[in-house]
Image (cartoon, rainbow, N blue to C red):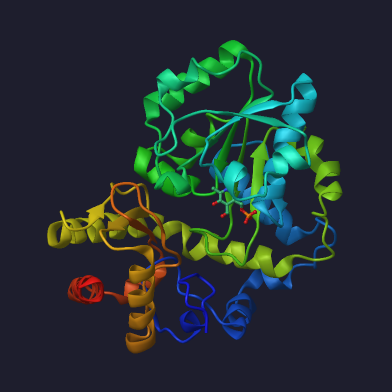
């Protein structure tokens, strides 16, 4: 049995209630979901081409207001293709990224190691960039990438004015703007903009299919026809041409039908949950502002204590609270909350009870 609290911990498999994300599905439940989709009767795809893939790409291009979109088995690969496209066009191997971005922190530095790109940081470690950060960027850049919101900075989201200023800066300097929109739909809710208004800021953008859309995996890169045609060969070079990907694609179409219309509900639920936690537990706990469907909670206890007591609750109550425990900013330990359909099964008193239980257990453990 693993001691560390992590999303693939064996105790999670036995849980019946989950605070974050969409309710996890078994292999059979995934297949049953897909079996009920009428798009299953379309012709099967082959190496990136097929009617269900085209349908998904078209639907997302429409939602994002872009000429074209392309399915990728991993968002990371789609983004590397876009960054390479922009940097090769301008013969400039420098990009701007957030210091806590997925590109810099979660991809084994593929942008450096595989593409030979050099990263300059836009924004401070624990916050989204703001307009003053723009003017300290180097004059020559192949692309600027902005993650909306920056998950590892506590889901920090730049404000709309800063985004407009960045767009104006990109217009002036002719530097292409890429958006890492793994959570773009959630960011649009928080910014009070439509998805296409946010996407319109970018020359290229990626959206995840398996975050709020709840697909099995994958992502979509969107932009001009020229961009999408231009990344095709690199998609192949990065191993992105797969014999068939229909389970990913059909599950994403399911997500567009069922989760997409509920995004505002997931975000509203996150706001209500954070408000309840603030009222009940601050100042002992620190509850961040909500960005879309996500926020972070910080505890005044060591990571090992929060982890072991959360695992105890998982074992005893079959309730899974957090997918990982992280270093806090204001207090020693941080956890993330990202609301999806799993939260449909909670009511207010259950939330309050489980957090009282967790906090009092942690207090007892540290004496
Ligand atoms: C902000 C962000 N960007 C990019 C990715 C990459 O997604 P994928 O796992 O599809 O490569 C993720 C995945 O967690 C992410 O959170």
**What is the quadrant of residue 158 in the picture?**
top left
Q: Is residue 69 visible in the rendered structure shown here?
A: no
Apparent side of residue 77 relative to residue 168 in the rendered image (left or right): right
The single residue placed furthest to the front in the displayed view is 367
Residue at 79% across / 59% down in the picture? 50
Give the percent coordinates (x, y) of residue 292: 37, 49
Vertical position of residue 107 compared to residue 363: above or below: above
x, y (%) of residue 168? 50, 16
* Residue drawn at 31 percent across, 49 percent down: 290
Residue 318, image quadrant: bottom left
> Depth check: 20 or 28 in front?
20
Is 263 situated left or right of 184 in this image? Answer: left
**Rendered position, 260 above or below 6:** above
Which of these two is toward me, 269 or 104?
Answer: 104
The answer to which quarter of the image holds residue 246 is bottom right
The residue that appears at 39% across and 47% down in the rendered structure is 154
- The answer to whether residue 244 is visible is yes
Depth check, front residue: 118 or 195: 118
Q: Position of residue 268 (x, y in %)?
A: 29, 55
What residue do we see at 85% from left, 64% from top?
A: 243
- Give the answer, above or below, for where 148 lies relative to 92: below
Position of residue 82 relative to residue 240, above or below, is above
> Front-most of 356 and 188?
356
From the viewer's perspective, is 77 left or right of 318? Answer: right
Query: At which x and y percent is residue 367?
Result: 20, 73
Q: How many circles with numbers are drawn on the protein?
A: 0
């Amino acid at each position: 049995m693993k001691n560390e609290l992590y999303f693939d911990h064996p105790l999670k498999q036995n849980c019946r209630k989950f605070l974050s994300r969409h309710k996890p599905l078994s292999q059979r439940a995934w297949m049953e979901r897909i079996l009920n989709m009428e798009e299953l009767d379309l012709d099967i795809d082959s190496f990136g081409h097929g009617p269900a893939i085209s349908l998904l790409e078209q639907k997302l291009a429409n939602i994002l207001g872009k000429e074209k979109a392309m399915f990728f088995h991993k968002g990371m690969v789609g983004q590397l293709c876009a960054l390479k496209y922009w940097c090769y066009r301008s013969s400039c191997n420098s990009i701007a990224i957030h210091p806590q971005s997925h590109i810099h922190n979660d991809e084994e530095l593929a942008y450096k190691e595989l593409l030979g790109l050099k990263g300059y940081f836009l924004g401070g470690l624990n916050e989204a960039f703001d307009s003053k950060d723009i003017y300290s960027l180097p004059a020559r850049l192949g692309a600027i990438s902005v993650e909306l919101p920056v998950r590892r900075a506590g889901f920090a989201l730049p404000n709309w004015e800063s985004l407009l200023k960045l767009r104006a800066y990109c217009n002036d300097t002719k530097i292409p703007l890429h958006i890492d929109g793994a959570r773009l739909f959630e960011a649009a809710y928080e910014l009070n903009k439509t998805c296409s208004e946010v996407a319109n800021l970018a020359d290229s953008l990626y959206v995840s299919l398996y975050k709020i859309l709840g697909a099995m995996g994958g992502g979509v890169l969107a932009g001009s026809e020229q961009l999408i045609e231009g990344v095709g060969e690199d998609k192949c070079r990065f191993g992105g041409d797969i014999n068939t990907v229909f389970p990913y694609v059909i599950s994403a179409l399911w997500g567009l039908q069922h989760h997409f219309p509920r995004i505002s509900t997931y975000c509203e639920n996150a706001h209500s949950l954070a408000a309840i936690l603030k009222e009940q537990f601050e100042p002992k706990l620190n509850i961040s502002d909500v960005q879309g469907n996500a926020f972070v909670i910080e505890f005044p206890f060591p990571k090992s204590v929060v982890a072991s007591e959360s695992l105890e609750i998982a074992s005893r109550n079959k309730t899974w609270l957090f997918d990982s425990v992280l270093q806090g900013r204001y207090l020693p330990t941080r956890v993330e909350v990202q609301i999806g359909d799993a939260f449909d099964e909670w009511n207010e008193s259950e939330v309050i009870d489980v957090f009282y239980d967790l906090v009092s257990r942690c207090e007892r453990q540290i004496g």
